[in-house]
Amino acid sequence: MKAKEYLNIMQKILHQVDEGVHVLDSDGNTIIYNNSMSNLEKMSSKDVMKKPFSEVFKNLNNENSTLLKALKLRESTINKKQTYLNKDGKEITTINTTFPVFHGEEIIAVVEVAKNITEMQQLSHKILKLQDEIEKPGEAKFNKIRKYNFNNIIGQSSNFVEVIERAKKASRNSASVFIYGETGTGKELIAQSIHYNSERKDMPFIAQNCAALPETLLEGLLFGTSKGGFTGAIDRAGLFEQANGGTLLLDEINSMPYELQAKLLRVLQENYIRRVGGSKDIPIDVRIIATSNEKPEKILGEGKIRKDLFYRVNVIPLNIPPLRERREDIPLLAEKFINKYNERFNKKVYTLSDNAKEKLLYYSFPGNVRELENIIMGSISLIDDEEILTLEHIGEDDININSITHNINEIEDKGIDDYLADLEKKIILDALEKNDFNISKAAKMLKIKRQTLQHKIKRYEVLIKN
Ligand SMILES: Nc1ncnc2c1ncn2[C@@H]1O[C@H](COP(=O)(O)OP(=O)(O)OP(=O)(O)O)[C@@H](O)[C@H]1O
Ligand SMILES: [Mg+2]
């Protein structure tokens, strides 16, 4: 086979491998530059191929280029870690091996193979940072937590007050609590309030999201590791030990790996932990609060949570109703957030306009209280020196109640009849708004009789004013 054909085949094969490969001939011209190398350095193959290396990479010399070092000084570099900016300005970390290829005494080519470890590098940084935080819990972790108490919780609707009353009772003992609520309903707020209102308040409150980490990492994090437990493991206390005497919030327990749930159950039943790879039983006294943003029946039915574990943590169940089921709390919360962001942004808004209030009252808030807070924050940050927050500030598009995107959670909760009634109510309100609350005009727009509209307005109590 001719050398040229041979090179061609090599080139094709090398385009398929993950490592970047760059080969120069004895004159310093590039003869192989594969796709991975081109992706890494963000240089197009045609700008590099068959060209003199020193011309293409002008800022490289015998000192800082391993390829030139191999070509000019006959030196090999094995597994050298390099961090540099590629042509797009992105920081890349690679492990490089570079060596000359000899024919007798003569160099016929130099080869560089580069493995991209940028992502691995980032991951390892993250893990080290995490370990650092765990080792210095007093400094890093606790101080960052905002301490919430029951005084920070706003809400007067009966279904919400009922839950808060139960939560207050829970703070008088150490039984496990299971909080279910959609995203943004205040699960963390309530969990912290329970802790900081309890006898344990001077001991640590530690929150861990169970969905954030793969099983082995989460296990080590919760229970700690012992030297030799797995390669490179060090002696390190887990969150259970750190939370000793206090409260451990297991957030999104519905996403905890199933196998680990069994180990968690054992710990909760026996009140001691054993570090991963360790042999000593360490007694612990930790109050558990678990949360889920999916309904208990659903996660049980789908087998996302073990029944035995569920019953062990569900001693005090707290179901936080979504905001759309306690609409009377919307104006109260809005007022609180208006005050909060007035102060933060130095504004002087003191109330909502009627149409803004109306709009918020009938919006479905899939993101619950957090979404309401964001809406208010966003509009106050943009306001000039007005004193009333109106629909224009809020931005029609952000909370588009007339767009008919149905909320499956809401349908599940209410059934289709109530859901459709609610939707009709929203459409009517919207039509009224568009027509300056002129009933005849709104009826015309909706293509129904004026009396029919009037009847519906009455039935749905569309025009209640706060
Ligand atoms: N009843 C309330 N009164 C005052 N603020 C509230 C209330 N409920 C929620 N918030 C605020 O809404 C935001 C979201 O609350 P939190 O983080 O407790 O929700 P969550 O249920 O844990 O949400 P996720 O499931 O997304 O983690 C927080 O800023 C919190 O202070
Ligand atoms: Mg939360």
Image (cartoon, grey):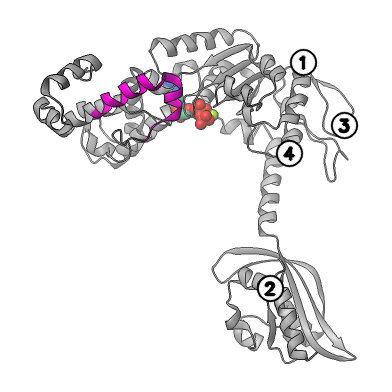
The part of the chain drawn in magenta is: 405-427
Sequence-wise, which precedes: disc 2 or disc 4? Answer: 2
Identity, as a three-letter code, of the amino acid under mark 1: Gln
In percent of width and height, residue 42 lies at: 58, 71
**421 drawn magenta:** yes
> Which numbered tag is attached to residue 15?
2
Location of mark 4 (residue) = 217
Location of mark 3 (residue) = 278
* Residue 212 visible to an observer of this rendering: yes
The residue nearer to you, when weighing 367 against 8, is 8
| Rendered view: 201 above or below 16 | above
Q: CA distance from mark 4 to mark 1?
A: 22 Å
Identity, as a three-letter code, of the amino acid under mark 3: Gly
| Rendered view: 463 above or below 140 | above
Foreground tag (1 vs 2): 2
Badge 4: residue crowd in 10 Å (few <14, some 14–19, many ≥20): few
